[in-house]
Amino acid sequence: MFPHNLLNTFIFIMFLKFYENSSALIVSPNFENSNGILTSLPTLNNGELTIYQSCPRGNNVSSGRPILLLIYDIFGLHPHAFHYADRVANLTGYCVLVPDFFRLKPFPTKGYPPRNPNLVTKFIQRNGSFEHVVKPDIISVVDHYDADKWGAFGFCWGGKMVPLLLGDATLGQHFLASVSIHPAPVKFADVAKMSKPQKLMLLPSKDEANLVPLCTYLNRRLGRDTCETKRYTDMPHGFGGALGNWKNPRIMKNVNDSIKNLYEKDLVGVKDESVVTIDEALFKVDDCNGRRIICCASLRK
């Protein structure tokens, strides 16, 4: 594990480097305003993997409880990923892990979208392959943390990865359910290997394709409660991820609603009734260090 104070300073400098002058940077990049820690572990093929680890008070990853996995969008360890993980951990009572698959080399938010859309495609092919990057990294995470139950959720590119995770012959046995928030295009082939009793929730924005046929296919094949979908008809793609303007109350309301849907989906099969209420976990925002940001530490009981 990295020395905490040293790593805080390092990650703050890196955030400034990657996100400086970016209009997408709506919340403070100050790592101290997040609840979690950064740790690392060796992987099968890809070297050291940094992980943001957010746990609710009184819980830790060694307590034998279920763990949730957040797969971020192509913009990597953005503060929104940290604070989304904090809120989910606070609400569910489970630890949330955010692996840095891109090794601090995400796609830049500055100038997005690029004039040449092939740049995004090439970035994903090079850095975001499920078989060569995501799968071996998650195998290493699952082996290291050894939780009895896992759930997964993701944004955009990450939202496409989570159904692949459910259908994978090696990893699918560990994951009961997943939630895809404004996912990159999810195809029938991406969900074809899912099996009972796995569950999938799809939360597209107004910009994604119609995902009802995909849910209908899964429900006919695996049972009527296998897949659910809810469209945020007034939200742009990316509203819950790095590009979301979390200063906008309407967008923030829908971010909170996506977390509520994620909680009610019950990713690991058992809800912890001892945690704070949904209203306490989601709808109070404090002014931390003079900045209007999400600060879940103030929401703990």
Image: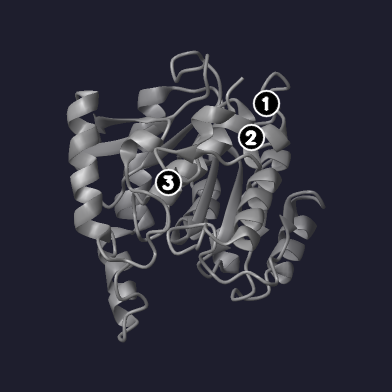
Q: CA distance from mark 2 to mark 1?
A: 6 Å
Report the disc number at residue 281.
2
Disc 3 from disc 1: Cα separation: 24 Å
Sequence-wise, the earlier of marks 2 and 3 is 2
Closest to the observer, 73 or 187: 73
The one of 151 and 291 positioned closer to us in this rendering: 291
Label 3 element class: strand
**CB atoms of marks 3 and 1 within 8 Å:** no
Q: Which of marks 1 and 2 precedes in the sequence?
A: 1
> Is residue 233 something one can see in this rendering?
yes
Which amino acid, mark 2?
Ala
Amino acid at dot 1: Val
Disc 1 packing (10 Å; few <14; some 14–19; many ≥20): some
Residue type beneath disc 3: Arg
Residue lying furthest right: 224
Residue 276's label in the rendered image is: 1
In the displayed structure, 211 sits above or below 296; it is below
Horizontal side of residue 129 vs 7, given as left or right:
right
213, 234: nearer the viewer: 234
Q: At x 19% / y 36%, what residue is drawn? A: 9
Q: Name the residue carrying label 3.
A: 291
Residue 183 against residue 144 in the figure, above or below: below
